[in-house]
Amino acid sequence: MAVKPAVPVAEGPRTLLSRDLPGYGRDMTTRDSITSIMTPDPATIERSEPISAAYAMLDRSSFHHLIVTEDDAPVGMISTTDILRLVYDVDGVGERELRTFIDHQFTIDDAMSADLQTLGTDASVRDAAGKLADGSFHAVVVLAADGSLAGIVTTTDLARYLRDLR
């Protein structure tokens, strides 16, 4: 059995190159299905709910995006960052007071992005990467053929996909 030589550790900052990624050289034109990396049945919140409900859901979960629905149809997305932007200047109040404040000052419409990035379940991972590549959005809503919500793909899902390439 051959022993692989040790790789010297470079000193100082290093630029990560494509060839350094696991799976480098894999044909990235393959049509791996978006459904293989999406989170099915993602968390949603009805547009009419108070913004404190969105805040509470995001605060106690490991995810950072909620799909806003109206009559079960996706109409927007709200993230932890969106809510934090609203309360950035609020200091010296407890959790309960903060929730009351945001409910009196804001609605979900004030914080959500109505510019949804969507793909169908027939899309590929590459299609999702194309939607998210410019950095303006961090999640893509995945819709079933009938237009109903099927899942969500985030930049974290894409990073895990790349990490797991062999």
Image (cartoon, helix red, strand yellow):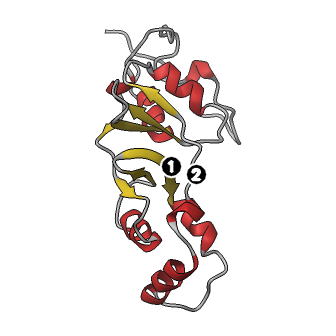
Give the mark, 1 or 2, whose residue is nearer the N terminus: 1
Q: Which residue is mark 2?
A: 113
Q: Quadrant of the N terminus?
A: top left
Quarter assignment of residue 148: top left
Q: Position of residue 93 (x, y in %)?
A: 53, 91
Kind of element beneath mark 1: strand
Circles 1 and 2: CB atoms closer than 8 Å: yes
**Picture layout, residue 123 above or below residue 84:** above
For the point 59% across and 42% down, the residue is 137
The numbered mark at residue 76 is: 1
Q: Position of residue 136 (x, y in %)?
A: 65, 41
Q: Quadrant of the C terminus?
A: top left
Q: CA distance from mark 1 to mark 2?
A: 5 Å
The numbered mark at residue 47 is: none
**Residue closer to the observer: 131 or 109:** 109
Report the residue that reaches farthest toward the front. Answer: 71
For the point 58% across and 24% down, the residue is 130
Pointer 2: residues within 10 angstroms few (<14), some, or many (20+)? some
**Residue closer to the observer: 165 or 45:** 45
Q: Amino acid at mark 2?
A: Ser
* Position of residue 49 in the picture relative to residue 79 (left or right): left
Kind of element beneath mark 2: loop
Q: Position of residue 56 (x, y in %)?
A: 38, 70
* Position of residue 135 in the picture relative to residue 51 (left or right): right
Q: Position of residue 144 (x, y in %)?
A: 34, 28
Q: Amino acid at mark 1?
A: Gly
For the point 43% across and 16% down, the residue is 4
For the point 50% across and 56% down, the residue is 78
